Amino acid sequence: MTPDTLLSWPTPSRSRNAPPVEARFAAGTAWIDGRIVPVAEASLPLLDWGFLRSDACQETISAWDGLLFRLDDHLDRFWRSLERLRMTSPLSRDEIRGAIHALIATAGYDNAYVQIIMTRGRPPIGSRDIRLCTQRFQAFCIPYVWIATPEVQQRGLHVHIGSRHRVPATSVDPMVKHYHWLDFELGLLEAFDHGAETVVLTDGQDHLLEGPGFNIFVRKGEKLLTPRSGMLDGMTRRTVMELCADLGISVEETDVPVAALRDADEAFLTTTAGGVLPVASVDAKAIRNGPGPFTARIHAAYWQRRADGWLGEPVDYTVPAALASE
């Protein structure tokens, strides 16, 4: 591996390294019915259609070094999901923002992974009229999640192109961040059977779409290609496209054939849970430059911008004591 392909790692500069408000919150926190509880104690009513029907939406938000990243953009997208699912939030935008800050502060984390969730609720027993449901908000906070360890990132992920197709956009809107993951999960099992670490699903027309919790970029020559539709408009994907505009790297949103990935000069995945993740091989065949110089450059820019506070909101570590349950 050459110096221009080595990944640089973020060095926290403002971390507090403070303990949780109480020891019972050390493993994480959850927001349940307006109260903060230890994450292991969080529960959802069995009859909520979020559980029974996967009728829910979510946003996953990260904090690094005491700064929440793109919080307003995440809240915008959360409200877009609510509108498309015809849900009504029982909390205001400001109240949800406050809950996010309180969850992190109660746990005492500098680096956090927060998921905010809206479930449909349940209609009266025996009814399937979801118009009669009252939506429920809940959330949790755990330590920052890396879906690939630093060691795996340095050598690159082994990716499998799944034989299973992604649920089509005409059936389930991919612009809603939802929990319809059976296609992903069965694809993951297929990937594991083939000795790979993750999977990318296609649209059934031999075009790449996305994987479980990530978007994909493929380098061909001096240009990056990324799918233009049929997948979630990931927040890290958006960030990478903005960084590439600043770095003078051309990005084209287009239909990306499977063959383009198999013959890529480089490829990487983008996700809130880790940022920019290099790909080393596809279906056991090594990528030409994996990890490569484009990936390393974008990876470095991503973490440097976050360290500089770009699009960051400082976590408010002042927590109302009444929020923590007895």
Image: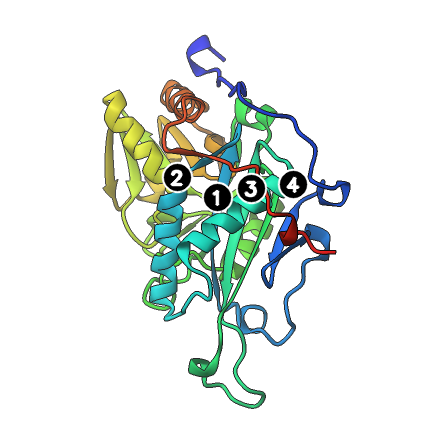
| Label 1 sits on residue | 61
Q: Amino acid at mark 4?
A: Ala
Contact? badges 2 and 1 (CB < 8 Å):
yes
Contact? badges 3 and 1 (CB < 8 Å):
yes
| Label 2 sits on residue | 70
Residue 172 placement (x, y as % from top left): 38, 65
User: How far is mark 2 from mark 3, CA to CA?
Assistant: 13 Å
Mark 4 surroundings: few (<14), some (14-19) or many (≥20) residues within 10 A:
many
Mark 2 surroundings: few (<14), some (14-19) or many (≥20) residues within 10 A:
some
Counting residues from the N terminus, which is met first, the one under dot 1 or under dot 4? 1
Disc 4, SS: helix
Q: Amino acid at mark 3?
A: Tyr
Residue 79 placement (x, y as % from top left): 37, 58
Q: Is residue 195 left or right of residue 181?
A: right
User: How far is mark 3 from mark 1, CA to CA?
Assistant: 6 Å
Residue 133 placement (x, y as % from top left): 48, 78
Counting residues from the N terminus, which is met first, the one under dot 4 or under dot 3? 4
Q: Is residue 154 left or right of residue 235?
A: right
Counting residues from the N terminus, which is met first, the one under dot 3 or under dot 1? 1
Frontmost of labels 4 and 2 is: 4
| Label 3 sits on residue | 113
Task: Establish if 178 lies above or below 321.
Answer: below
Frontmost of labels 1 and 4 is: 4
What residue is shown at x 38% (from left), y 18% (from top)? 293
Task: Establish if 293 lies above or below 80.
Answer: above
User: How far is mark 1 from mark 4, CA to CA?
Assistant: 15 Å
Q: Which mark is residue 218?
A: none
Instruction: Work out whether residue 179 or residue 224 is closer to the camera in this orientation and state it.
Output: 179
Q: Amino acid at mark 2?
A: Arg
Residue 124 placement (x, y as % from top left): 55, 86
* Residue 309 is at least partly visible in this image: yes
